[in-house]
Amino acid sequence: MVMGAVRSHIGEAEDRFFATVFLGSGLLFVAMLFAVAAGTGSLLAALDRHPRASRHLWDCGRRSRGGRGWA
């Protein structure tokens, strides 16, 4: 949403290099979101299956997902 608004505001002044860098950074950001969500989800699922997991690892998993209840 934000990327589209910035690109439409620039309009004709946008060159090919800027467009490529802008698109690449957006795709990298989305890929990192998926990677962090997958890693955090798997960590919390593994710790949930093992009741003797240390409290330190459990807290690390909770902090890595940002404290939200939907990871």
Image (cartoon, rainbow, N blue to C red):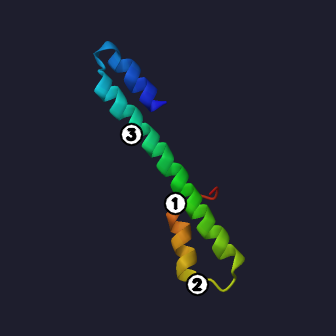
Label 3 or label 1, whichever comes before in sequence order: 3
Percent position of residue 3, x then y: 43, 30
Q: Is residue 33 above or below residue 1?
A: below
Instruction: Choose between 15 and 63: the one closer to the eye.
Output: 15
Percent position of residue 6, x then y: 38, 26
Label 2 or label 3, whichever comes before in sequence order: 3
Q: Which residue is mark 3?
A: 25
State the quadrant of the C terminus. bottom right
Marks 3 and 1, how far apart at CA = 22 Å
Residue at (30%, 28%) from the top-left corner? Answer: 18
Considering the numbered disc 2 on the image, is that residue within a helix, a strand or a loop? loop
Q: Which three-letter amino acid code belongs to the residue tagged 3?
A: Ser
Q: Nearer the viewer, mark 1 or mark 2?
A: 2
Q: Which three-letter amino acid code belongs to the residue tagged 2?
A: Ser
Q: Which residue is mark 1?
A: 66
Q: Which residue is mark 2?
A: 54
Instruction: Choose between 30 and 71: the one closer to the eye.
Output: 30
Percent position of residue 30, x then y: 49, 44
Considering the numbered disc 3 on the image, is that residue within a helix, a strand or a loop? helix
Residue at (54%, 74%) from the top-left corner? Answer: 59
Q: Is residue 19 above or below residue 43?
A: above
Q: Is residue 25 above or below residue 55?
A: above
Q: Nearer the viewer, mark 2 or mark 3?
A: 3
Percent position of residue 65, x then y: 54, 61
Q: Which three-letter amino acid code belongs to the residue tagged 1?
A: Gly
